[in-house]
Image: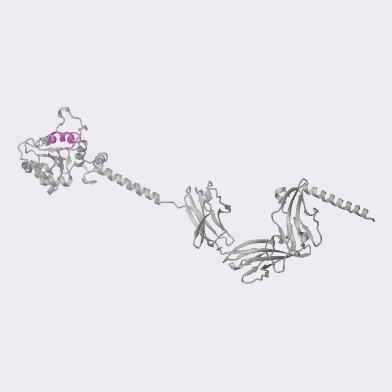
Amino acid sequence: MGLLPLISLLTLFWAAQSAVIARKSSVLDSCIDFGAAFDRVFSVPGEAAVLNCTLDIQHLFNPANTSYNITWYNKRTGSEVERVERDVILQDRLLWFINITMEHQGSYICVVRTEEKCFKQATVLMVTEMTSESCVRAQTSVQRINAQVNGFLACPLRSYLKSVDSASIQWYKNCEMIEEDEKFVPMKDMLLIKNAHVDDSGFYTCKMTFHLDNIISEMTETVECEVHDEYSMNPRMVEPVNDIIKVDIGSSWSKSCRVFVPGKGIHFVGVLWKYNVTFISQDISDRIHQTILEEISAADGVWLVRTLWITEVYEEDFNLNFTCMVSSARGNPTGQFILLPADPNFLLPLVLVLSSVALLFILGALLCTFFKVELTLWFRNMFPFFYKTTDGDGKQYDAYIAYPRVLEGSSEMAEMFAMRTLPQVLEGLYGYKLFILGRDSLPGEAVVDVVEDAMKRCRRLLLLYTASSLCSPEAQEWAEQQTGLYQATVEESIKIVLLEMEEIRDPHRLPPSVRLIREKQGALQAWKKRKRWTCYDMKSEDRVTSLDPSARFWRKVRYYMPVRGKAKTSSVWFSL
């Protein structure tokens, strides 16, 4: 074959290849492009590498109702990546390179096709030559653990364990194989570091050996471990602890969950309230809600407080198991309490009753103090049968009216009051029977004998006096007064009532016996707070104009007068 035909044949071959590449390129150009994935895949020659299609199919369409297929393309050549025995394996979304070489480095496009659409995204594979002195891979992830507690390192290759067979993981620290001892405990896909120390920081490499389609291969990843001198220990539930709490229906109530986390640093502990199996809302507008988690720093740890609020307790809230739950990697303690109806509160009604009784007692005492006379007179009128009758007591008169009759003009006021006003009121209105010397005695009788005899037949002695009637020497010897006062003070056979017609400015001028009685029981002062007497009808020509006592004065006079009850003589109800 000549040179010209050979050149023509090669030209046709390259033209055909260019046409195929162009056709494939035009097919990929029609797909929706999501660009290149941010994460790179790193590997070294001789090991396996796996590319994962980074397209999120769940957000592109519904895979349950849409049929689709996944293909891979080499971006550099534009050709579709197909399964190659002992070299490339396609596994759903994964593209496995069993024995990596430098020629495998480059970008690979994951294409997802449905009947209507096409999507693509590129993933970059980086292949790095390794030296015999180092086992640290170019791709490293940083994992942090705390000092003085146990910590775990997770192998980054753990996500591929379900995709391969007979997988085993070996750990290395700074290229030295780690065997199980008091410090390290290799686990299936994790490495336990006991009582971590700052010296445990460094590079840890995990090598996964596996079988895939009867091919043995291995992958390696490196983890940079950072040990922080911060730690937290097991959280401890302080309250509630199986509490039984009694509350009133309709009341507002709250309960705080208090958890203590010993140690220092970030604790990663959560606290939540629930009742039965339902978590409680954090919306403060709900009747039952929980507040935000409050953290209170302490010298040896941190307090976590979350409060449960019930704005109004319903009957349905009783006998429910309210639980405070703690979630952490170092323990999950819980605390519970139950609400029960409150016992009847007798203290408040008792206090109210006692307060009411005390108030009534005080009011009664005030009424008795200020209205004793009025209440007594009213009770006598309404319930006369509570008092024994005066019939048969050997007395003929209710009261003996005594007043000085010594100085001319000095006793005129008292005489007018005794002879006219007292009979008109006490006898005319209330039916009392009075003895008045000169009116009820016979002319010519001895005054001393008449007075003594009349005193014995009277139940009261009403002694009327003015400012001048008892202050003269003559008045001191007045027989009527002396006899009555002697019987009242010494023999106590008759009760005396002083009727004071005028204001006495100098009580020391009164006779000693009168002054003693006045100081002991007081005197009824007709001159005080004078008001016109209107309780009885009287002709204008008979109306007293020299002295006109108030109505209260007359009530006090009646108060001290004998009580004419209706009970039998032998029945003793009250002693006056």
Vertical position of residue 332 compared to residue 181: above or below: above
Nearest the eye: 4 or 323: 4
Q: Which colour assignment does the render follow?
A: one colour
Number of callouts? 0
Quick check: can you spot residue 562?
Answer: no
Q: Which quadrant, please, contains the N terminus? A: bottom right
Give residue 427's quadrant in the image.
top left
**Residue 432 falls within the magenta-colored stretch:** yes
Question: Is residue 35 rendered magenta in the image?
Answer: no
Indicate left or right for 19 with 180 as reference: right
Residue 75 position, x and y percent, is 77, 53
Name the image quarter holding residue 475.
top left
Task: Please report the bounds of the magenta region as a residue range.
Answer: 417-433
Residue found at the far front of this picture = 3
Q: Which corner quadrant holds the C terminus?
A: top left
* Closer to the camera in the image, 71 or 452: 71
Q: Is residue 454 visible?
A: yes
Residue 405 position within the rendered picture, expressed as x and y whole percent measured from the top left: 8, 38
Horizontal arrangement in the rendering, residue 422 relative to residue 108 (left or right):
left
Left or right for 382, reference 321: left
Q: Is residue 41 left or right of residue 470?
A: right
Task: Look at 71% across and 58% down and name the residue there.
Answer: 41
Q: Position of residue 151 (x, y in %)?
A: 61, 65
- Which residue is at the front of the view, 174 or 219? 174
Secondary structure mostly seen in magenta is helix
Of all residues, the one furthest to the top in this rendering is 540
Asked if 114 appears above or below 134 in the picture, the reply is: above
Residue 284 placement (x, y as % from top left): 53, 48
**Does residue 132 sit above or below 116 in this rendering?**
below
